[in-house]
Image (cartoon, grey):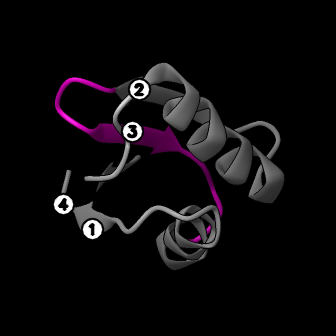
């Protein structure tokens, strides 16, 4: 399980865009977004760095947080 802080994620639409980026890398990934606190949690076997890169490619800077 990975947790990312995504400061630019300010609404449900933003969260959906981040989710699409994650699911593009791993269609079976578990995904939850906390828009209020600007965090996402992902359960995936894809390396954390790849998911972080996908989130950035979607236009959102992010920071991995230890879980």
Residue 61 in the image: state x and y as whole percent.
38, 68
CA gap, disc 1 to disc 3?
Answer: 12 Å
In the rendered view, tell whether residue 39 sits above or below residue 64: above
Q: Residue at x 31, y 26 (%)?
A: 35
Residue 31 in the image: state x and y as whole percent.
54, 31
Tally the marks. Answer: 4
Q: Main secondary structure of the magenta part?
A: loop
Query: In the rendering, which numbered label is found on residue 11?
Result: 2
Foreground mark, 2 or 1, reads 2
Looking at the picture, tell me which residue is in the foreground, 16 or 4.
16
- Quadrant location of residue 64? bottom left
Q: Residues within 10 Å of mark 1 (few under 14, many from 20)?
A: some
Q: Residue at x 69, y 52 (%)?
A: 21
Foreground mark, 2 or 3, reads 2
CA gap, disc 2 to disc 3?
Answer: 16 Å
Q: For numbered disc 4, what is the local secondary structure?
A: loop
Provide the residue span drawn in magenta: 35-47
Who comes first in sequence, dot 3 or dot 4?
Answer: 3
Who comes first in sequence, dot 2 or dot 1?
Answer: 2
| Residue of label 1 | 63
């Amino acid at each position: 399980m990975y947790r990312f802080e995504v400061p630019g994620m300010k609404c449900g639409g933003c969260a959906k865009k981040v989710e699409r980026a994650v699911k593009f890398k791993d269609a079976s990934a578990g995904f939850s977004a906390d828009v209020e606190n600007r965090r996402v949690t992902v359960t995936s076997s894809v390396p954390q760095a790849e998911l972080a890169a996908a989130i950035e490619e979607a236009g959102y800077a992010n920071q991995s947080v230890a879980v």
